Image (cartoon, rainbow, N blue to C red):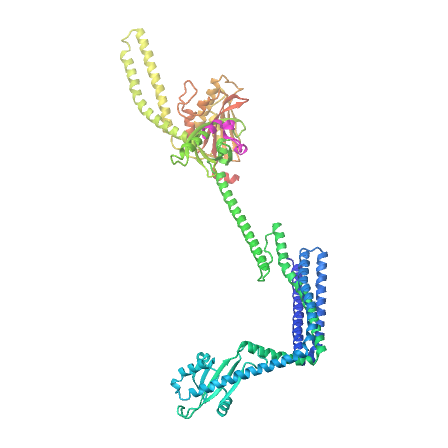
Amino acid sequence: MSATGAEASRKSKALRWTIGFGLTAMVAVGLVLMFLLTQATSNRVLYERNYQVLFAVNVVVAVLLLLAIAWIAWRLVKRLRQKKFGSRLLVKLAAVFALAGFAPGVLIYVVSYQFVSRSIESWFDVEVEGALAAGLNLGRTTLEALSADLEGKTRTAAAQLADKADVTVALPLERARDAMGADDLQLWRASGRLVAAAGESRYQLTPEMPTPQQFRAARSQRAITWIEGLDEGLVPGATPARIKVLALINSAAVGTLGEARYLLAGKVLPTTLVENALAVTQANREYQERALAREGLRRMYIGTLTLSLFMAVFGGVLLAVVMGNQIARPLLVLADGVREVAAGDLSPKASLRGKDELDGLTRSFADMTQQLLEARQAVHTSMAQTNAARAHLQTILDNLTTGVLVLAPDGTIVSSNPGATRILKLPLAVYEGRRLVDIEELAAFGQAVQQQFEAFLAYGRERNLDHWQQSFELGNTSLDPTGRPSNTTITLIARGAELPSNQNLLVFDDISEVVSAQRAQAWGEVARRLAHEIKNPLTPIQLSAERLEMKLTGKLAATEQTLLAKSVKTIVDQVEAMKRLVNEFRDYARLPAAELRALDLNALVQEVLNLYAPDHAQVPILAELDPACLPVLGDPQQLRQVLHNLLQNAQDATVSAGRASPEHPVLLRTRWLPGTQRVRLSVQDSGTGFPDHILKRAFEPYVTTKDKGTGLGLAVVKKIADEHGTRVEITNRLQDGQVLGAQVSLSFSVERAQTHQTT
């Protein structure tokens, strides 16, 4: 809220308080004056002194109230013309309250006017005056008769108690009370000490004692009588009127130190008798007073009645406006709050502090709005936490090397993570909403996965299994960093489970390198054992053949001698070939650990290429070396062996395809890859490529397409690459579906210090 709005709100509140206080003060003054005026009508002295002044002041107050009502009505009309919200409700409430006060007031005034006019005339009838005098005499005579009767009975009881001692007087006193029909009997000493009591005073801690004057009067007159509760001005029924008799008990023998005793008797007068006596007395007094000013009394009553009507009507209209405003104000506050909530504003709402239900409703609405605000904030907080958790989970999924797919029950891809895209080398985000089996490259994989899920959902629950696990081998076509197609085969280990949302979760990882490493390790063990088992008999075989030739030379005919020499030579040549094969197995099995250090890959390649001079090579070698390549971490000796194996395989493949010409050279290329901070080495040939079944296992020992090859060349390359932490790939080069040759690529990590320097 702005400062101007706050100031206006304070001024409006102050104005309402001022108006309310002023109206309350006028109404209070009017009620006080009206009360005084009514008092003046019943008090002749007060009427003669102040009636005219009080009447004039009441008229002034009535005029002020009339002006206040006119001002409030003008504000209501103005508010209605301005079409402010709630104006019609205020007008209706004010009209209802005003009508509710005005109509009964007029009706009562008319009836009261007729009644007062005729009643005053009937008050002063001669028969009424005689009846009042007869009533007074009758009441006086009745009271005198009752008093005389009680006095006689009290004297009799006093005579009976004259010879009773103080300690034994309680029971006779009670019997005397019952016999005389009194409500209360008390035995007093002249000193004011109560000796005994029977009746009502028996249970009073401090019963009322006669006055010393009454004791003296009773001593001199032997008995006195008086009536309590019939004094003028007492309210009928407030204190029971009763007759009391105080009688002297004559007993010289029983008294203590000559102290006299008195019997006090009390009897309650009948309520009807007392009320009638007081009513007759009051009526007679008023009749005598009003008879003195008969016409003035009539004008006084009519004027007071008329002024009372005006005050009642004005007060009713004023009360109608005030109460209407009080009733409408909470409704207006609620309406404003509802309109703001409907517009989406849940800020704290205004409420009223009153104790009635409508004010309580505004507080309940404000509390409800506050709870809605807190609930919305809690929802926003929960949504923020959920989004943060989702972002956190998404970050984890995005950085997982493991592939994650969420599939619908029919195999439709719901979501995937970048790890799945990297492993399968397909833009899976594009395929979301499609079934896995409908993707051409993954049709077989999707079919196998769907079968695994169906079997798991059918039997997994019965066997208390929470997931299934299976390995898959699939090949796909992707683009290498140079933009050329590359056929690769990968081995996946996949695990599937059912999600609570009735969806399926597929998690898989590429274990091609693990499988390849396991196979290489197995072949290394085989090579080690073969080298050990085969090499031992070769030397004795060779020596035996040479000794046999030496022993038989000169002892055979020329024909047999030629056959012997040829056979021995064949044995020795084959033994040498076996030795070379065994040495290759030994080298593969006993490949030493790489000693990595920083080296210039381009310089190492150039050094190796010097051994492949164009004059001595059947297939020329074309080198494309990127000068931007940074030094890599490697073992120079082992990397030379890698280069030799790759170049020899490339030349042999090109020759076997009949393309040994300068138009089809072997391409040796190095490239700096800034995005991955790695250096890529690739060797391309122009051969026939690899069949699919060979391509999947090209790096395993004894897997070769050569007629005379051992199949250990690429296996050694793979083992050296693993020692260097380098990823090696072999693919067929395709163009328009035709195989143009094969390519072997290795990706080396650069030296860390050089990477930081470049960055």
Q: Quadrant of residue 575?
A: top left
Q: Position of residue 751 (x, y in %)?
A: 47, 37
- In the image shown, does 221 or 327 lie closer to the viewer? 221
Q: Is residue 330 visible?
A: yes
Viewer can see residue 488: no
Residue 427 lies within the magenta run = yes
Main structural element of the magenta stretch: helix, strand or loop? helix
Question: Is 451 in front, or is 700?
Answer: 451
Residue 264 % position (x, y): 47, 85
Q: Is residue 279 above or below residue 714?
A: below
**Range drawn in magenta:** 426-449
Q: Nearer the viewer, residue 91 or 366?
A: 91
**Of the pair 650 and 473, the residue shown nearer to us:** 473
Residue 75 percent location from the top left of the image:
71, 61
- Up/down of 120 relative to 579, above or below: below
Residue 122 drawn above or below residue 361: below
Q: Give me the residue at 65% from left, 80% from top.
A: 130
Total tally of numbered discs in the picture: 0
> Is 315 drawn above or below residue 727 in the view shown?
below
Q: Quadrant of the N terminus?
A: bottom right
Return the x and y of residue 272 as percentages of the image width and height. 55, 76
Q: Is residue 534 magenta?
A: no
